Amino acid sequence: MVLLKGYVTIATVDPWMNMGRTNTTIDPSISNANTWTTHRLSGTQHPCSSRSFTFQRVVEIGRVVMINYGPDAGKLAVVVDIIDHNRALIEGPTTGIARTGYAFRRLTLTPLVVKVPRGAGQAVLKAAIEKQDLAGSWAKTSWAKKIASRAQRAANTDFDRFKLQKYKKLRREIVNKAVKATKA
Amino acid sequence: LKKVKKVNGEIVGINEIHEKKPLQIKNFGIWIRYDSRSGTHNMYKEYRELTRNAAVEACYSDMASRHRARSRSIQIIRVAEVANADVRRPYIKQILVPGIKFPLPHRVIRSADKAHRALFMGSRPSTFY
């Protein structure tokens, strides 16, 4: 069982609990129930110790990942196949990532999934991505919006910063006036 | 088996084996004969790789780590592609399960490049994905 510090793992039936250990025998009859649950032990200092955590972002065929290291950092790709417990075969036909094996260490899972069969070819993958409008649904996520706003702020000219200053001041004045009115 | 030591033989030619389908994941079964500290043994190991060369490299690294066998003590008898149905090792079989999915339980957030590494952090990072 994978024992996380301060956590108690429940739902012990999943064979993927043994990942990383290559000399344990996996019983194929164990159902692949999606029962990833860890309950934080009450009494730890964590502020949300009453919540139960399930892993929502899961490595699977079709999972959209962001490459987080190397020359292609920041680009999205889709998991096309899984090589072993450390690496996946990923491809991003719309973002310019060639089909390669990538370590999970260099990837960040996103909440998006594309419906493709295991080992799908580039054409099938591209069609599925475009049909689902992955670019659109990615742009709607707050993650993508934050990246965009960071990029915009870095690209602001001095005039843009001046305009921003004026707008923020205007907003502040309106808000403060309204607050003062309610206090009076 | 080839019982020639480097000193006694002469390298006539070296050619790299180019993979026919380097983007297709294959299961490689490798038959090895290696010398341990107290005898010589045969082994059969399986690796899931994209190319034959990568499988052999993985094999040498694996033998070095698990059995402390240096490359000079290893003789690779045979490298063969194994079909999914004929895989023998459970650690490979578990990847071949259809509908495979697993989480990554311990997420380490690293900076995208060495220049932006932080030496100190304000608060302890969360490793929940």
Image (cartoon, coloured by chain):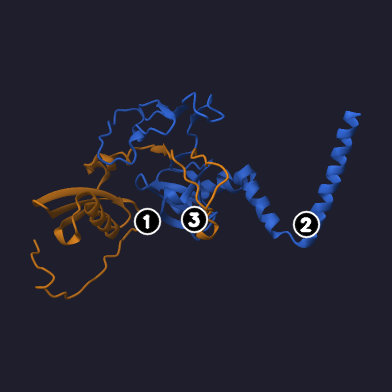
Chain colours: A blue, B orange
Residue that numbered label 2 is attached to: A161
Mark 2 nearby-residue class (10 Å; few <14, some 14–19, many ≥20) = few
User: Is A134 on the left-hand or right-hand side of A87?
Assistant: right
Q: Are marks 3 and 1 on the same chain?
A: no
- What's the distance in space between the residues labelled 2 and 1, CA to CA? 48 Å
User: Is B25 on the left-hand or right-hand side of A34?
Assistant: left
Residue that numbered label 3 is attached to: A69
Give residue A68's position: percent from left, percent from top.
51, 52
- What's the distance in space between the residues labelled 3 and 2, CA to CA? 30 Å
Give residue B20's position: percent from left, percent from top.
31, 61
Mark 1: amino acid: Leu
Q: Secondary structure at mark 2?
A: helix
Chain for numbered disc 3: A
Residue at the image point whose x is 40% and y is 28% from the top:
A33
Chain for numbered disc 1: B
Q: Secondary structure at mark 3?
A: loop
Q: Quadrant of residue A154?
A: bottom right
Observer-nearest residue: B21 or A147? Answer: A147
Give residue B80's position: percent from left, percent from top.
21, 54
Q: Is residue A35 visible?
A: no
Mark 2: amino acid: Arg
Residue that numbered label 1 is attached to: B23
Mark 1 nearby-residue class (10 Å; few <14, some 14–19, many ≥20) = some
Observer-nearest residue: A62 or A161? Answer: A161
Mark 3: amino acid: Tyr
Observer-nearest residue: B53 or A22? Answer: A22
Cβ atoms at labels 2 and 1 below 8 Å apart: no
- What's the distance in space between the residues labelled 3 and 1, CA to CA? 21 Å
Give residue B72's position: percent from left, percent from top.
16, 62
Name which of mark 3 and mark 2 comes first in the sequence.
3
